[in-house]
Image (tube, grey):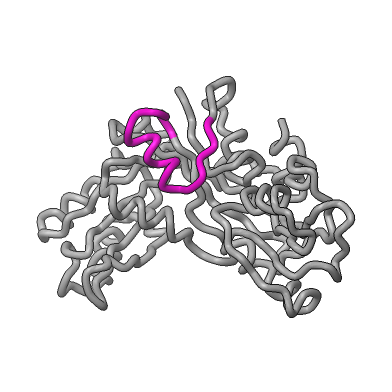
Amino acid sequence: MTYAYLGPRGTFAEAALRLLPAAEGAPWTPCATVRAALDAVRDGTASTAVVPLENSVRGVVPATLDELAVSGSALHITAEIELPVGFALMAKPGTALEDVDRVLSHPHAHGQCRQWLSARLPDARVLLSTSTAGAAREVSESGLSCDAAIAAPVAAERYGLRVLATDIGERVDAVTRFVALRKGGPAAAPTGRDRTSFLVPSEAVAGRPVTELLTTFAARGVDVTWMQSWPAGTRLGSYHFFLDVDGHIDDEGVGRAITALHQKGIDVRFLGSYPHARALEPVPKATEETLLA
């Protein structure tokens, strides 16, 4: 097994990967973008990729949903990790808070720290990066002393930066959900605490009420726990739908619901069955140990 993840080293994606027992001892490759990590799986360079899917404060990660929508059912989710996250502002040694003119970070990290930035650095320009660790690396390699990054505190040590402020996020209980994906294949055996994900393409629900999806599952005793619409990119009002349901694809209720939807002419594409993260042991907050180990 080989693993790709949203890099560079020091990202929360790396911390999530470290919590996957199957990844221990396997080769890991950091990738510059979500697409690059998933392309590594598609072309066989890696067997599995770990990427962020959603955050409890800022919602879904657009790059990941874009890739899942394009891939259809070619990639399957095999595991999920819910990782509590925290943020710090960091800059080159010798830089004071009042010197900062530009702040680099991932859009989700910036979104979770807007209130702090507005109060403490109202005139600073925000530049977006592909990851929090990538922002820290950019600041480290920049020739400008006015740059700072929002990242995990440990990224400062990894890239030789000085922490200017810690715990700058708006919610101390923020959590990011990461998923591990591989090429499509048979699902792992049921564990009794599973979640199953599906993609419903836009053409499958054209002209139909979205409630038809929900009621078809509910009528068979299956709870839809997450539903996300995503633009198909063809015309205004055309959306794909991502669904998570409680249960395994081999569970009778889930299977009957999918059969019923197919009989109605609604194409539902399987994206994976895997143990539900909230049914597992509590996940520790991303720490120096998980990011630097």
Q: Is 194 placed above or below 147 here? A: above
Q: Horizontal placement of 210 versus 54: left or right?
A: left
Q: Horizontal placement of 112 versus 58: left or right?
A: right
Q: Residue furthest front?
A: 143
Residue 275 visible in the picture:
no
Residue stretch rendered in magenta on the structure: 29-48
Residue at screen point 72% across, 35% down: 292
Residue 243 within the segment the image draws in magenta: no
Residue at screen point 16% across, 50% down: 259
**Residue 232 position in % (x across, y down):** 27, 65
Q: Is 203 placed above or below 28 here? A: below
Q: How many marks?
A: 0
Quadrant in the picture for residue 211? bottom left
Residue at screen point 10% across, 55% down: 263
**Residue 158 position in % (x across, y down):** 74, 40
The N terminus: image quadrant:
top left
The C terminus: image quadrant:
top right
Residue 66 visible in the picture:
yes
Residue 46 within the segment the image draws in magenta: yes
Question: Foreground residue, 55 or 248?
Answer: 55
Residue at screen point 35% across, 67% down: 229
**Residue 224 position in % (x across, y down):** 37, 59
Q: Is 206 placed above or below 122 here? A: above
